[in-house]
Structure formats: structure tokens, C-alpha cells
Amino acid sequence: MWEDQENWPFSDQIYDSATISKDDYILIIGGFTGESFEAAESDVVAKFAEVRPKWSSIGKLQQRRYSHGVIGNSEDRILVIGGNNLRFEKNSCYPGKKFFFKVYRRVSNGWK
């Protein structure tokens, strides 16, 4: 049965984000908020845990991004792959730009 839980607390909306699902929690990583310029891109890594049904920010991406992908592995590492940003920087995946990926690993106080 579905139950209402706490709304996303970090912006009015979030979409084009990446999601990882684990046994007892999910992570929402980055995304697009629809807000003005730089605030339109999220660098938030947020966790929603089943045991404590509340959103918490557990880290920040090194670069704000949306429309990206993530891959998790058994060593609690997450690869953040591709995506866009509004600054047209060298790591943005627009035509003619380099493909970008970053590996994050879980540490005791968040993700690094």
C-alpha cells in the first residue's frame, strides 16, 4: 500500500535527475529544478531511507548537472556519467564536447 511521505525539500521540483536504488534506501543525484539559471541545476545527493522515511542531503556533486546517468557497484561506488549543465563547460556533453564521468565512493560522512 502506498503512503504519503515528506515532499522533496531541496527545491520546488526535481526532474532529469539520476536515481540509485539500494535495499533500504534510494539516492536522487543532481537534476533540474526549473528555477533560475544556476539554481536550475542541482548538485544535491539526497537519500530517502525506508527505516527513517525522510529526505536528507548526504553530499554534493563536484559539478551541478542534469540528464545524466549513474551506475552503482557492489563496492558502494557510484559512477556519475554524462549529463548537461547550463554553463557549456568542457565537461558538458553537448556536441563536440568531451564525455564526462566521475566516480564517487561512500565514506563515513557522505560521498566523496
Image (cartoon, rainbow, N blue to C red):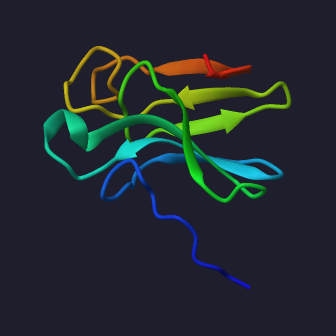
Residue 93: quarter of image: top left
Q: In this view, does 10 lie to the left or right of 25?
A: left
Residue 99 percent across, percent down from the top left: 44, 21
Foreground residue, 14 or 66? 14
Residue sitting at 33 percent across and 34 percent down?
84
Number of numbered markers: 0
Q: Which of 90 and 2 is in front in this view?
A: 2
**Residue at the spot 78% in from the left edge and 28% down from the top edge:** 76
Q: In this view, does 11 lie to the left or right of 46?
A: left
Q: Which of 101 and 43 is in front in this view?
A: 43
At 67% across and 82% down in the image, what residue appears? 2
Image quadrant where one finds the N terminus: bottom right
Q: Which residue lies furthest to the bottom in this view?
A: 1
Q: Where is residue 106 in the image (x, y as percent from the top left)?
A: 71, 23
What residue do we see at 67% from left, 21% from top? 109
Q: Quarter holding the C terminus?
A: top right
In this rendering, position of residue 2 left or right of residue 84 = right
Q: Which residue lies furthest to the left in this view?
A: 36
| Image position of 24 (left or right of 110) | right
Residue 107 % position (x, y) = 72, 18
